[in-house]
Image (cartoon, helix red, strand yellow):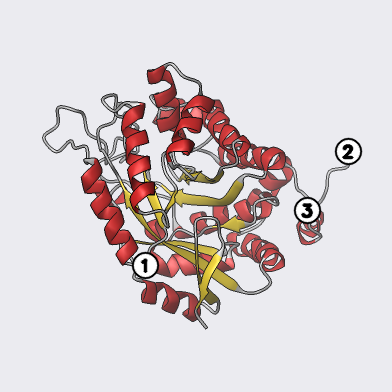
Amino acid sequence: MKTLSIDDIKEKVLRSERISAEEALRLWEETDFVELGLLADAVRRRLHPDNIVTFVVDRNVNYTNVCVAGCKFCAFYRKKSDADAYVLSVDEILKKVEELVSWGGTTLLMQGGINPELPLSFYEELLSRIRERFPQVQIHSFSAPEIVYLAKKEKLSVREVLERLKKAGLMSLPGGGAEILSEEIRKRISPGKCSADEWEEVHRTAHELGMRTTATMMFGHVESIEHVIEHLERVRRIQDDTGGFTAFIPWTFKKGNTELDFVEEASSPHYLKVLALSRVYLDNVKNIQSSHVTQTMQIGTVGLYFGANDLGSVMIEENVISSTSYKVSIPKVEDMVRAIKKAGFIPAQRDTYYNIIKIFN
């Protein structure tokens, strides 16, 4: 096979032709972040010619911080014996959902640690009570590691766990726990968490059951660009087969109170270049999200010119990244609308499934 020049690879992208992993690596090595950003922006404009940038109003409820996974990048988890370990009661969570609804939110994101004290019945009761009291809320909750751990704990298959959770009220799954979908990296930073293949099994199974999910990537720690491309290739392959991912959401590792504090954090240009490469490579994933939470709103909106068409969420609550030394700034709806307009786009509030609820002209 003829080896293409870098200009030929760029032309493939502009002609909407799929590039290979090897060609993605060439783009990374032989273009700067501005060049790659321009390619990604062309892809975004082709997929989203209306110039609309979306966001969701949600709440991230971390129902427990007790976790046995012991991920080296995490500052949030606690051991059961720690003084500040907690498990929220169902009533406490319902109160948080009530506040979400009163604030005009549509999406409930619940994630916690891998807590061995919580049986599947806890999750079923929680979901059924939320659905009964707040049927209008879209329950977008529980990451693949939580599902895999529950399956092993209850001696059930992943499918059986997802079927029971769906029956109780679970509607879609976030992509959390993906980190880098490379076993080499997972063994270094999250050896107590599910494998890349298990993460894939959860999402494929959810898609088979008619549930939509997101795919995520947490980078900027000990991975190489080859590991990033390996991750993107896995996501693209799953999407080819199932079409079940609504969006891809990459963000960077933030240090402070973690076992990876020796790592130099990824720069903003590095983040933007990875974001752009993701948009170029994931030709079958319609929505790419820019992370204002880990990058600040200023860089988050710059990401809209590097392939992203979504600016994430207006969160009532954020606990995980806030556990590091990074100061998280959570915008209000008017802040998000103003930032998107200032960047030159049309702001729109969406739901979990990227259906537009309201356009802010």
* Mark 3: amino acid: Ile
Q: Between residue 311 and residue 258, name the one nearer to us.
A: 311
Query: Is 353 located above or below residue 204 in the figure?
Result: below
Would you call the spot at circle 3 few (<14 residues within 10 Å), some (14-19), or many (20 or more)?
A: many
Label 3 residue SS: helix
- Tell me what residue is drawn at x 56 percent, y 50 percent: 248
Observer-side mark, 3 or 1, equals 1
Q: Residue furthest top?
A: 155
Residue position marked by numbered label 1 in the rendering: 104
Task: Give the percent coordinates (x, y) of residue 303.
Answer: 52, 64
Q: How many labels does the image show?
A: 3
Disc 1: CA contacts within 10 A as few (<14), some (14-19) or many (>=20): few
Which residue, as the protein is rendered here, is positioned at the far left? 83
Q: Nearer the viewer, residue 31 or 293?
A: 293
Q: Where is residue 346 in the image (x, y as percent from the top left)?
A: 55, 77
Residue indicated by mark 3:
9
